Image (spheres, helix red, strand yellow):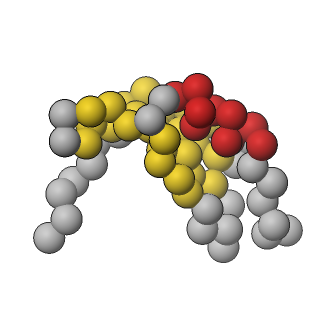
């Protein structure tokens, strides 16, 4: 069974939501597109990188 991830510092930029979580003692940031059918998500080592990815994400789902 996978470990439960507790997100903190949630932020939304357009359709992309950014959250911070701890993974093996390190802070990680993830960016996830909330548009139905898109499925894009990615993990980053800094919130700045996640914010840049959120601003540059162009969802292909109309």
Asked if residue 43 is positioned above or below residue 29 in the image, the reply reads: below
Q: Which residue occupies 44% across, 35% down?
A: 45
On screen, residue 27 above or below 5: above
At 43% from the left and 27% from the top, the residue drawn is: 9
Q: Quadrant of the N terminus?
A: bottom left
> 36 above or below 16?
below
Q: Is residue 38 left or right of residue 22?
A: right
Answer with left or right where residue 21 lies relative to residue 45: left
Q: Horizontal and vertical percent for residue 31?
A: 55, 46
Image height of 60 relative to 42, above or below: below
- Where residue 54 appears, x then y in whole percent? 68, 41
Q: Is residue 26 visible?
A: yes
Judged from this view, the residue extending furthest toward the left is: 1
Q: Position of residue 35 (x, y in %)?
A: 68, 61
Q: Position of residue 52 (x, y in %)?
A: 68, 34
Q: Quadrant of residue 23?
A: top left
Give the mark count: 0
Give the quarter of the figure containing the C terminus.
bottom right
Q: Nearer the viewer, residue 48 or 1?
A: 48
Q: Which residue is painted at 48% across and 29% down in the image?
A: 46
Q: Is residue 36 visible in the rendered structure shown here?
A: no
Question: 51 left or right of 57?
Answer: left
């Amino acid at each position: 069974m996978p470990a439960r991830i507790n997100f903190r510092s949630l932020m939304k930029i357009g359709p992309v939501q950014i959250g911070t979580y701890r993974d093996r003692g390190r802070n990680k940031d993830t960016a996830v597109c909330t548009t139905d059918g898109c499925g894009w998500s990615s993990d980053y080592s800094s919130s700045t990188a996640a914010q840049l990815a959120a601003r540059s994400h162009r969802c292909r789902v109309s």
